[in-house]
């Protein structure tokens, strides 16, 4: 049983977690836990870029307006202003860390994506996330105050209930985590804990999220006593590669931003003119995803076509080298032929409720990134605002912890993880069966277009599975698969509860039973 007390525990090694760790490590000892590898999170997968006002013709007010329009009025304006006004400084810090953003005649090259009124996306070709992840990880590895511990699946937050002397105050003191290599459960105790564990995309059958995006942070925080907000707002990316061999390969928004057309694969009809004639392919993601979903369902298609072959070949290869190489390996030449695409779950806009200081409802727990609902995205995330949120709130969490350090008391004695009443599982098939079942009914019943009846069917299945998974969890030793299944099911329940509570269609939540939008935008806040 490890019981090394660090000053601060960070759960997650993506953009939010590492940004916070680097800001704290000036004078605090920081432990960063990662499930699987240090590069297994969503940050490394981000193709598009980071939105910031850097062009002379652009303004903060433009970026704020674009974000609010995409968010269908559900954003909190003070959060939007806070993030966007801090964006240029975040880009500067990344440049200092060595992120090699594309440049043109010495200036940063800015691209444009759906929903943006100006070119304001800084990028590293079409693999920005990987470059950012690499730079942050290198800086963290070189910092003597940061300990990086991969291969740790966090099970639950440690609160006063786990103290040798019981406390019901809800104060967070770290987390219990499974060492994936040895199968032992460790306790990692700290004065302050930052949750940066990413989203819940793997709740869905088709998702661009990495394998580990099982809503761990949201589920752990909920079980510990945090409110969650707007979990029904699941963003579906309009264009994920349709290929039976390759799962989850995203075709970035920027392909449409640089002139790509969406076409009916049989007739060649450019159908976005029927859904949003003014903005066409540059309409916000929810509109484009619904259009793609409608075409596929209405005409019984497997996919639709995204075509940029009318642009010069060198332009396409130069802007999208990663995508070009990947597709060529699959026998698709995007300079000469269209790309088959389908919508897929892409981003969790809801999550743990936080303030501008990144504080959650629980003392001792801060949160940043995709596991949170900060008020930035509202009912739909504007393209390339996601990495930006990670940097700004990672910094905000670190700043608040450092400013209030003297008020944070030392942790009490914490009990070891109790394995006295469990055995090794002899029924791994249960986990696989339930995992598959959740993802399939969530896709079919809680997807891009919803109805009350479908949502109620999903809720009924979740109720049955909760009893089954709860019984299994109580009898067998934890494994990463079991931890993820428990969190996946909890996340699914929160999404369905939130969706049933919203009696309107707004942004990403589109229901045939309530097709109109209420005059007043209200958050869906669930209380544990």
Image (tube, rainbow, N blue to C red):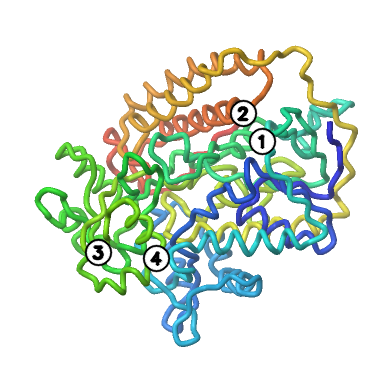
**Which label number is shown at residue 44?**
none
Give the mark toward the camera: 1 or 4. Answer: 4
Q: Position of residue 28 (x, y in %)?
A: 84, 57
CA distance separating discs 2 and 1: 8 Å
Q: Is disc 2 in contact with disc 3, using a CB cutoff of under 8 Å?
A: no
Residue beneath the point at 74% across and 45% down: 193
Of callouts 2 and 1, which one flags the residue occurring earlier in the amino acid sequence? 1
Residue beneath the point at 83% across and 26% down: 416
Judged left or right of residue 288, residue 466 is right
Give the mark toward the camera: 2 or 3. Answer: 3
Disc 1: which residue: 153
Q: Position of residue 168 (x, y in %)?
A: 79, 28
Q: Is disc 2 in contact with disc 1, using a CB cutoff of under 8 Å?
A: yes
Question: Crowdedness of circle 1 by 10 Å Cα count: few (<14), some, many (20+)?
Answer: many
SS category of the residue bearing label 1? strand
Question: Crowdedness of circle 3 by 10 Å Cα count: few (<14), some, many (20+)?
Answer: many
Judged left or right of residue 102, residue 237 is left
Of callouts 3 and 4, which one flags the residue occurring earlier in the amino acid sequence? 3
Instruction: Return the residue nearer the eye: 268 or 51.
Output: 268
Of callouts 2 and 3, which one flags the residue occurring earlier in the amino acid sequence? 3
Instruction: Return the residue nearer the eye: 140 or 492.
Output: 140
CA distance separating discs 1 and 4: 34 Å
């Amino acid at each position: 049983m490890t019981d090394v007390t660090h000053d601060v525990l960070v759960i997650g090694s993506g953009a939010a977690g590492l940004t916070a760790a680097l800001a704290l490590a000036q004078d605090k000892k920081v432990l960063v836990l990662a499930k699987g590898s240090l590069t297994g999170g969503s940050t490394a997968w981000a193709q598009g870029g980071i939105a910031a006002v850097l062009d002379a013709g652009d303004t903060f007010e433009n970026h704020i307006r674009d974000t609010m329009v995409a968010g269908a009025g559900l954003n909190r304006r003070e959060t939007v202003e806070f993030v966007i006004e801090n964006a240029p400084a975040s880009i500067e810090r990344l440049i200092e860390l060595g992120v090699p953003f594309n440049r043109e005649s010495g200036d940063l090259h800015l691209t444009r994506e759906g929903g943006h009124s100006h070119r304001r996306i800084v990028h590293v070709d079409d693999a920005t996330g990987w470059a950012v992840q690499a730079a942050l990880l290198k800086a963290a590895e070189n910092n003597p105050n940061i300990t990086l511990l991969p291969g740790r699946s966090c099970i639950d937050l440690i609160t006063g209930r786990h103290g040798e002397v019981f406390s019901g105050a809800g104060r967070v003191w770290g987390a219990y985590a499974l060492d994936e290599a040895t199968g032992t459960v460790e306790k990692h105790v700290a004065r302050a804990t930052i949750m940066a564990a990413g989203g819940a995309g793997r709740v869905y059958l088709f998702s661009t999220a990495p394998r580990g995006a099982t809503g761990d942070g949201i589920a752990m925080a909920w079980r510990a006593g945090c409110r969650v907000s707007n979990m029904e707002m699941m963003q579906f990316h309009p264009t994920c590669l349709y290929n039976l061999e390759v799962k989850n390969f995203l075709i970035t928004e920027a392909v449409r931003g640089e002139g790509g057309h969406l076409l009916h694969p049989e007739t060649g009809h450019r159908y976005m003119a029927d859904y949003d004639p003014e903005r066409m392919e540059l309409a916000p993601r929810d509109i484009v995803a619904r259009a793609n979903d409608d075409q596929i369902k209405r005409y019984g298609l497997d996919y639709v076509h995204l075509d940029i072959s009318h642009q010069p070949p060198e332009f396409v290869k130069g802007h999208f080298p990663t995508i070009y190489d990947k597709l060529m390996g699959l026998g698709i030449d995007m300079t000469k032929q269209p790309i088959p695409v389908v919508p897929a779950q892409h981003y969790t806009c809801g999550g743990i409720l936080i303030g501008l200081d990144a504080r959650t409802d629980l003392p001792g727990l801060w949160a940043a990134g995709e596991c949170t609902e900060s008020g930035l995205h509202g009912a739909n995330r504007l393209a390339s605002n996601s990495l930006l949120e990670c940097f700004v709130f990672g910094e905000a969490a670190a700043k608040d912890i450092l400013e209030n350090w003297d008020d944070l008391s030392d942790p009490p004695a914490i009990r070891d993880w109790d394995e006295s009443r469990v055995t090794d599982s002899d029924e791994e098939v249960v986990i696989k069966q339930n995992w598959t079942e959740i993802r399939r009914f969530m896709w079919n019943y809680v997807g891009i277009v919803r109805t009350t009846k479908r949502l109620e069917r999903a809720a009924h299945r979740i109720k049955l599975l909760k009893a089954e998974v709860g019984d299994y969890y109580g009898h067998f030793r934890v494994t990463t698969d079991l931890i993820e299944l428990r969190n996946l099911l909890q996340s699914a329940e929160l999404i369905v509860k939130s969706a049933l509570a919203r009696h309107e269609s707004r942004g990403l939540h589109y229901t045939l039973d309530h097709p109109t939008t209420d005059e007043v935008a209200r958050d869906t806040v669930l209380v544990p």
